[in-house]
Image (spheres, rainbow, N blue to C red):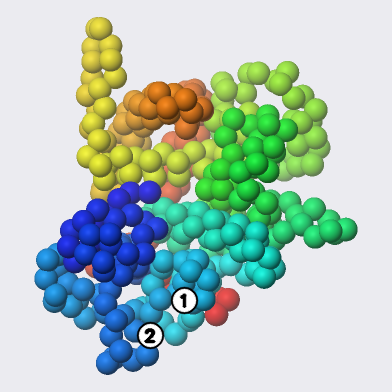
Amino acid sequence: MRVFNCDHCGHLVFFDSVQCLHCGSALAFLPDQLTMAALTPAPQDGPDLWRRLGERGTAQYSGRLYRMCHNHTTYDACNFAVPSNDYAQLCVSCRQTRLLPDLSDPANLRRWKQIEGAKRQLFYTLARLGLEPVPGRSGPVFEFLADLLGGPAILTGHQGGTITLNVAEADDDERARRRIALGEPYRTLIGHLRHESGHFYWDQLVRDGQRLDAFRNLFGDERQDYAAALDAHYAKGSNGNDWFLNHVSAYAAAHPWEDWAETWAHYLHMVDLLETAASYQTAVTVPDPHMALRHHVTDPFAASHPDFQDLVRQWVPLTLLLNSLNRSLGQDDAYPFALSSGAMVKLRFVHDLVQEAQQPADSGAPHLATSALE
């Protein structure tokens, strides 16, 4: 995630911070402002209310009042705040979760906290892209479930607007086992959520957005038998080695729906990493004896309609640097992909749809609707 500064003292703070280590201020993320903020208790204004502090280095107050998310006060599992005029107990991210595993099990509690953290990161990126729920548009619903002895296995997936995730995916060893068993080079919680959100937004942007013909021309006909396509993909195993010509990953070649979801996830990877690098004012020079070009990374959300080629020109050298840094520490590549021109065309398609779908923001802030779950 991008980095922030404490708006009381200016010290560096992070997306998941709950306290400034420099001035001791309580911190919370404000979804209505899409920023981290320093807060101070405001009991004079009401029970459990907090007031946002003013500009850095001052004790002035902004006037905005908030409450901490119920999952923060009860489970220490969230750092999002709720505007005081929103009477929901949960923040806009936590209220999207409909079903939870048995939280009396310490292992499930730990897993759930990790998954909610990844979901808040997804929420942030979608909100920056203008895709979080606004009036007239629904958002995804999440179910985080655990396998029960003697019961059916919980499968991660999307159906009818609901994203289901097996909480075992929060365990590093289990995630690594599945990654190896399925021959995947990359398997993370945020990767899962980004992929499954792609299925949700396919319904909204492609199917309901009257873009099926354009989609089929590029990704293929999604009406082909899905189960049969997956069976054929797994039966082929490592024998199918030409997927990289037109797909972002081997799994993307299984079916047009998976091709879209994998491409969508990669697009979210790209804009999130670029924003993070830009917040550090990163510039990358790729060593080349003939022409060493310096690439300055810019915030992909700074312009209302960023140019796709500009994003790619920054993205490629940034992933080279990222993987080289990982290798210097004896780690695997953080981004184990090399995108072909065919895959780039599909990424461009996602980019264009996202740009078309963006909602105009009021006073620079997103208009987030209250979930239908409340």
- Rendered residue at 12%/66% (across/down): 57
Residue bearing the label numbered 1: 73
- How busy is the neighbourhood of tag 1: few (under 14 within 10 Å), some, or many (20 plus)? few
Q: Earlier in the sequence, mark 2 or mark 1?
A: 2
**Residue 223 x, y percent position in the rendering:** 72, 43
Camera-nearest residue between 209 and 36: 36
**Residue 58 x, y percent position in the rendering:** 11, 71
Spatial distance from mark 2 to mark 1, Cα to Cα?
Answer: 10 Å
Q: Which residue in the rendered view is the most extreme toward the top?
A: 289
Q: Is residue 160 visible?
A: no
Compared with 209, 258 (above or below) is: above
Position of 367 compared to 279: left or right? Answer: right
Which numbered marker is on residue 48? 2
Camera-nearest residue between 360 and 10: 10
Q: Is residue 232 visible?
A: yes
Q: Which three-letter amino acid code belongs to the residue tagged 1? A: Thr
**Residue 255 x, y percent position in the rendering:** 68, 36
- Rendered residue at 26%/27% (across/down): 284
Position of 295 compared to 234: left or right? Answer: left
Looking at the rendered structure, the secondary structure element under dot 1 is helix
Compared with 86, 97 (above or below) is: above
Does the residue at mark 2 contact the one at mark 1 (Cβ under 8 Å)? yes
Which numbered marker is on residue 321? none
Compared with 331, 32 (above or below) is: below
